[in-house]
Image (spheres, coloured by chain):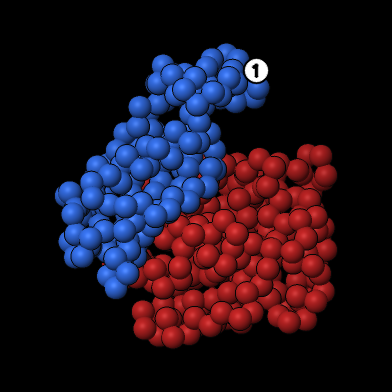
Chain colours: A blue, B red
């Protein structure tokens, strides 16, 4: 498995290369803080028991926070990258206090336009995909 | 040969993969699949022609459909022009028995997919709606399965005497080839795939983990 080091130019990007793995902080404390900051008062983002009463497996990480982690992962890999788009499909809740990992792989390179396409997957410890998506990233020539 | 019988491209509303990138991925990662079937949601993609890509990457690329019934989602292999007129592929309320029977009448094969999944899987509905008539094959390995969905599919397929296929249900490039179906002979086109499914000589395979 090829794991890309930090990237600064599109010419350094390889098709199929894995971005460095990223472990998002899914702790309930962070989730609660984030929910407060963005004004989401729902109990499902604050309390495991209350979330279970709503039929969830536990308090959930807001989708927009997961997207933030995806962006952070990309910038950890390519600090100079301009993220043109992040497109996510939320398949199942990301549960707070449960370890998750984010993986990313390069699936398309358009050197003429300076664009790189990245597959992104948020998975839990069992390897089950919770969120997947793609990012379109602009990198300098 | 091994075919991934369940994939989606950007032609599906939730698909994010370009077909050429699937091909590049399979070859660059040396995945043990010889081809894949594009099963776009609620449609049959008449227009796309992937023959040039198939030749360039030496892969078999076929087109099928994934439609929606009261029992959940169903893959349909061997879609013809006449079959697309026989029922509304875009509907989310089709009758599974109708899809199975009509597909059979038009020389196609209908296969309920991810049957162990809540809401959109067949076995989530058999207790309430009964065991549907006509089903012979179900998808027992699905690359997007969570929890024990594959185990529920396998257990029930065995209980009801269904054969099993495998497919990745990929929506992004890097998920293609997670599951597949192994056939004893070479399959070059959809007619041969339908024939192979009807011959009942195949085996579902999972490459997950």
Disc 1 element = helix
Residue in the image at 61% along x and 81% along y: B47
- Image side of residue B203 versus residue B109, left or right: left
Residue in the image at 78% along x and 39% along y: B127
Query: Viewer-proximal residue, B66 or A53?
Result: A53
Compared with A62, B189 (above or below) is: below
- Image side of residue B110 versus residue A11, left or right: right
Q: Quadrant of residue A138?
A: bottom left
Label 1: how many Cα within 10 Å (few below 14, some 14–19, many 20+): few
Residue in the image at 43% along x and 40% along y: A67
Q: Would you name the residue on which mark 1 appears? A: A53
Rendered location of residue B197, percent (x, y): 61, 71
Pointer 1 indicates a residue of which chain? A
Q: Is residue B92 visible?
A: yes
Query: Viewer-proximal residue, A138 or A106?
Result: A138
Rendered location of residue B157, percent (x, y): 64, 50
Compared with A72, B7 (above or below) is: below
Rendered location of residue B26, percent (x, y): 36, 67
Q: Is residue B134 visible?
A: no
Quadrant where the N terminus of chain B sits is bottom left
Query: Viewer-proximal residue, A90 or B55?
Result: A90
Q: Quadrant of residue B46?
A: bottom right
Compared with B28, A81 (above or below) is: above
């Amino acid at each position: 498995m090829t794991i890309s080091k930090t990237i600064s130019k599109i010419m350094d990007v390889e098709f199929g290369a894995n971005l460095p793995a990223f472990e998002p902080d899914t702790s309930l404390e962070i989730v609660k803080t984030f929910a407060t900051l963005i004004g989401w008062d729902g109990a499902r983002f604050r309390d495991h028991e209350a979330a279970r009463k709503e039929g969830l497996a536990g308090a959930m990480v807001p989708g927009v926070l997961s997207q933030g982690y995806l962006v952070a992962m990309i910038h950890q890999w390519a600090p100079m990258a301009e993220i043109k788009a992040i497109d996510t499909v939320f398949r199942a809740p990301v549960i707070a206090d449960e370890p998750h990992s984010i993986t990313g792989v390069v699936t398309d390179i358009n050197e003429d336009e300076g664009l790189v396409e990245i597959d992104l997957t948020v998975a839990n410890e069992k390897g089950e995909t919770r969120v997947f998506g793609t990012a379109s990233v602009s990198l300098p020539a | 040969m091994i075919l991934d019988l369940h994939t989606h491209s950007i032609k599906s509303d939730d698909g994010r993969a370009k077909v050429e990138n699937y091909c590049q991925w399979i070859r660059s990662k040396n995945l043990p699949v010889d081809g894949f079937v594009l099963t776009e949601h609620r449609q049959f993609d008449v227009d796309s022609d992937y023959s040039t890509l198939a030749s360039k990457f030496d892969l078999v690329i076929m087109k099928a459909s994934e439609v929606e019934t009261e029992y959940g989602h169903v893959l349909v292999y061997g879609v013809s022009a006449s079959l697309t007129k026989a029922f509304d592929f875009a509907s989310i309320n089709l009758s599974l028995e109708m899809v199975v029977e009509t597909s059979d009448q038009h020389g196609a094969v209908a296969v309920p997919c991810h049957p162990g999944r809540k809401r959109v899987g067949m076995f989530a509905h058999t207790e309430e709606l009964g065991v549907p008539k006509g089903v012979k094959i179900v998808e027992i390995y699905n690359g997007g399965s969570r929890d024990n969905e594959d185990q529920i599919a396998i257990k029930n397929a065995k209980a009801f005497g269904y054969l099993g296929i495998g497919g990745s249900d990929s929506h992004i490039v890097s998920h293609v080839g997670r599951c597949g179906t192994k056939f004893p002979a070479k399959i070059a086109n959809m007619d041969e795939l339908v024939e192979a499914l009807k011959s009942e000589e195949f085996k579902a395979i999972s490459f997950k983990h």
